[in-house]
Amino acid sequence: MASSALLTDHYELTMLDAALRSGVAWRPAVFETFSRSLPAGRRYGVFAGLGRLLEALELFSFSPAELGFIEENRIVSPECLSFLEGYSFSGSVEAYDEGECYFPGSPVVTIESSFGEAVLLETLVLSICNFDSAVAAAASRMVGAAAGRPVIEMGARRTNELAAVAAARAAYIAGFASTSDLEAGRRYGIPTAGTAAHAFILAHDSEEEAFSAQLDAMGTGTTLLVDTFEVERAIRRAVALCRERGVSGPGGIRLDSGNLATEVKEARRLLDDLGAEETKIVITSDLDEYAIEQLAGEPADAYGVGTRVVTGSGVPTAAFVYKLVAVGDSAGELRAVEKLSPAKQSRGGKKRAFRLVNEEGEARAELLLLEGEGEPELPADWALRPLQRRVVDGGRFGVQPDLDATREHHRRSLRELGAAAFDLSEGEALIETRYGLGGEARS
């Protein structure tokens, strides 16, 4: 497979080059990935992308092709090129499980290695985790608004072709039922779904001819798109054609335009009047969590979401940063370091992360303890749930859970936050982040 080593920024290599000259490249270092705040109005974030990150990290090496490009463009010195030629990540990675809910300050990925190894990974870590986690958070809110009805990811045509595959994976982790993207289905085993677009209807001499062709090719369980011309007439045609084939109606109809709240009610009434009570109604058309919530009382059976889950206003950035929090001194002893810039301050020292859970299984806080700091005494039946897991140990990559296990982990993490997690009104983070046993909090 292709190397991932150039999926990075120029300055990663120039920093490495200078660090090799100063000797800092060989010092032990700890980098943490976290978000200083949640997007405006969001109550929680959803961590996703770990599986893709680990795949990319295993492929992070410099073949003659990558080295030739770097040398030709005189990006680094010959000594640095020699270092890159032998590069293979030999450090350790601790991370939150994919699907875990996170909050401001949560160290979702912690990388320990030499400074020279770890400094190269910033862009790789952030480009994957920021995109996947943003999609997963948006998808999670949509699934919550759907209240048990399936949501289909249909955004492949609205974003970069490779991002579409990553988006389908992240949305599935957050609870989407399927994707329209076949590569996501092949690569990750995500169920795929889809039938026909308006072009298929328009290409035939009549809507009836198009419906007949689809029913004959895909069976009467297919979903027919009924809003190309006039919805009521299309539904009557669809039911009549299915009656000719021995069933009461098609498996489903899809509505993609108009006043959906009105259209879905009228469509359900007409289907029932025609005896097609089992026919499902799928609605699409630029849905987001707010539109889905507004339609919650209508008789729709499933939702298709594209633009608003893969890009645009539906997906505010996760805003993860990758910061050095500890580095070896001249004697090799780790010391905490932190950035003090206004509005961009970081907390020094490697953190251990826990979710504080009460006796009813409800999350009460995110607790971040420094290495060596003891755990607090808790009330009876309260617990500290560890959030980090070692996924790379001395360059050895562990086996990751499959996507179905990851989906279930997200459901458990979300349930721990309680009913407020499904509230789409603007508000603060559902739980506060506490640093150390002193209880200082940020939210």
Image: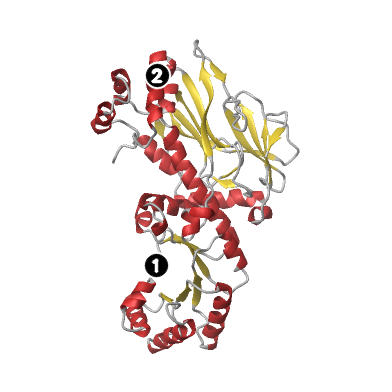
Q: Is residue 213 visible?
A: yes
Q: Is residue 147 visible?
A: no
Name the residue at 38% across, 15% down: 21
Of residues 439 and 316, which is closer to you in this image?
Answer: 316
Q: CA distance from mark 1 to mark 2?
A: 52 Å
User: In what element is the residue under mark 1?
Assistant: loop
Other-residue count near label 1 (Cα within 10 Å), few / some / many at <14 / 14–19 / ≥20? few
Name the residue at 43% across, 75% down: 225
On the image, the x and y values in percent for residue 293 come to 61, 64
Of residues 92 and 84, which is closer to you in this image?
Answer: 84
User: In what element is the residue under mark 2?
Assistant: helix
On the image, the x and y values in percent for residue 162 come to 37, 50
The answer to whether residue 112 is left or right of residue 206 is right
On the image, the x and y values in percent for residue 170 come to 47, 51
For discs 1 and 2, the disc positioned in front in the rendered view = 2
On the image, the x and y values in percent for residue 133 come to 51, 46
Q: Is residue 55 above or below residue 236?
A: above
Disc 1 vs disc 2: Cβ atoms closer than 8 Å? no
Q: How many marks?
A: 2
Q: Which residue is mark 1?
A: 194
State which quadrant residue 189 falls in.
bottom left
Other-residue count near label 2 (Cα within 10 Å), few / some / many at <14 / 14–19 / ≥20? some
- Point out the tag, 1 or 2, that comes first from the N-terminus: 2
Q: Which residue is mark 2?
A: 18
The amino acid type of the residue labelled 1 equals: Gly
Q: Is residue 148 above or below residue 205?
A: above
The amino acid type of the residue labelled 2 equals: Ala
Q: Is residue 113 above or below residue 313?
A: above
State which quadrant residue 55 falls in.
top left
Q: Which mark is residue 152?
A: none
